Image (spheres, grey):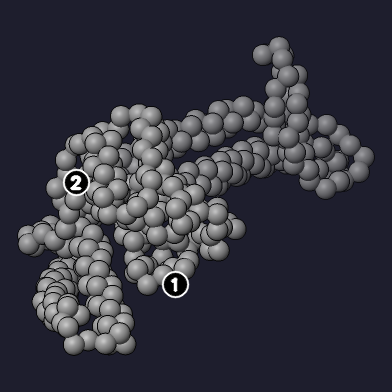
Amino acid sequence: MKGKKKKVHLIQNTSKTFLWTSVVLMVVSTVVLYFYVRNILQKAVEEELHSTEARIESAMVNNSNISQLPPMVEVENVIDLQIEKLKDTLIFDPSQNELEAFRELTSYTKINDKIYKITVRALIVETEDILVAVVVSYIIIILVVFVFLFYFNKAYNVRLWHPFFKNLEQMKHFSLTSDKPIFLEESDILEFTELNTEITTLTDKVRFDYKNLKQYTEDVSHEMQTPLAIMQAKIENIINSEDLNEGHYTLLTSIQKDIHRLTQLNKRLALLTRIENQQFVEIETFNLNQMVQKRIDYFNELFPVEIEFIPRHQIAINMDPYLAEVLCDNLLSNAIKHNDVNGSVRVILDGKTLRVENSGKTKLRSPELLFSRFYRESNKEKSTGLGLAIVQKICGLYGFSPS
């Protein structure tokens, strides 16, 4: 599996792209400039050498006396004509008392039936100095321009993308439960304007659909409670009547249990919906030990089961008190339902951990599915399969880790 790619900020990414592109272009242009100027200077030196050699030949044809000026000009008689040579060489310069770099042109010419070797040289130190000066000046200018453009480009991008970042922050704080419409900053960029229009349309539609769905869920949940309560009351009246045989009593008792289970299912689904819609916003700080002890006392009155409470630490918690009771009740109820006959239940508060244990010996078949909706390890009629799903939702709401 490939590792997760590191995310970078938009401005940082565009600045980095500009930086690397500029560096590559600067290096390439410097190299090109170096060889281009070097070639121009070298051609200038060679033209000067050819010009000097031509003047010397002209003077020799006119029988003028040519004064030797080593190492700049040397003329000597030779036996054979050879091809012209052009090269760089190091020669000792008596005037400087050191070796100097020269560009040397050696040509052969026949004048008045005599063959002469004419050697003309030019110092190339000055051309190298000129080349270095040109390249250094170019680099300095490029660096100044680069620094200016880099910060100008960064500042321009920040201003250009400001509406986008502002609207992104608005989207992060967008809430379905809020009646306030989302406020998006206007921009003179066409694409940003189109994006704002689409975001506004989408958020309005989502908020409208959410309100309708929320209202529908609440209405259905509320309307189902009344007929279920009426059915429950009528069945109880029939059960309590005198002219009821055993078969009818068994059937009505079963129906009564199904209605009770349907009532619980309706309540728990409504609770899950309210949790998912983040309708529990009341946060209080309270002592978890006291709340757990209160719920244990409640369950001890309802069930003939031993519940041992071991508070190793005092824990203060920040959450909705009602959801805290639901969380504790579901954990206790689940431990009691899936316990052995005459088994015990233990509740431990240790550090930042609330642990509920029972004395059941049956190993879980699929622990990874334990918090899934409607999943049941056993087919007990009392279980709706939503208790631990509600536990997981509450934990997720407050950043707890159920296991």
Looking at the image, which residue sits at the far front? 242
In which image quadrant can residue 196 be found?
bottom left
Q: Is residue 186 left or right of residue 44?
A: left
Q: Is residue 198 left or right of residue 397?
A: left
Task: Depth check: give the residue in front, 133 or 258.
Answer: 258
| Disc 1 versus disc 2: nearer the observer | 1
Amino acid beneath label 2: Pro
User: Is residue 393 at least partly visible in the picture?
Assistant: yes
Please name the residue that numbered disc 1 is placed on. Answer: 379
Could you tell me residue 312's position as x and y percent?
Answer: 38, 29
Please name the residue that numbered disc 2 is placed on. Answer: 321
Could you tell me residue 23's position as x and y percent?
Answer: 48, 43
- The vertical placement of 58 against 267, above or below, is above
Could you tell me residue 66's position as x and y percent?
Answer: 72, 29
Task: Look at the numbered disc 1 and give the secondary structure of its residue.
Answer: loop
Looking at the image, which residue sits at the far left? 180
- Which of the image's four quarters has the N terminus? bottom right
Amino acid beneath label 1: Asn
Q: Residue at x 86, y 46 (%)?
A: 82
Q: Residue at x 35, y 29 (%)?
A: 313
Looking at the image, which residue sits at the far right? 79
Q: CA distance from mark 1 to mark 2?
A: 31 Å
Task: Depth check: give the residue in front, 220 or 32.
Answer: 220
Q: Is residue 115 left or right of residue 4?
A: right
Task: Look at the numbered disc 2 and give the secondary structure of its residue.
Answer: helix
Task: Depth check: give the residue in front, 182 or 262.
Answer: 262
- Category of crowding for the residue at label 1, using alpha-carbon neighbours closer than 10 angstroms: few (below 14), some (14–19), many (at least 20): few
- The vertical placement of 301 against 92, above or below, is below
Q: Residue at x 28, y 41 (%)?
A: 292
Which of disc 2 and disc 1 is earlier in sequence?
2
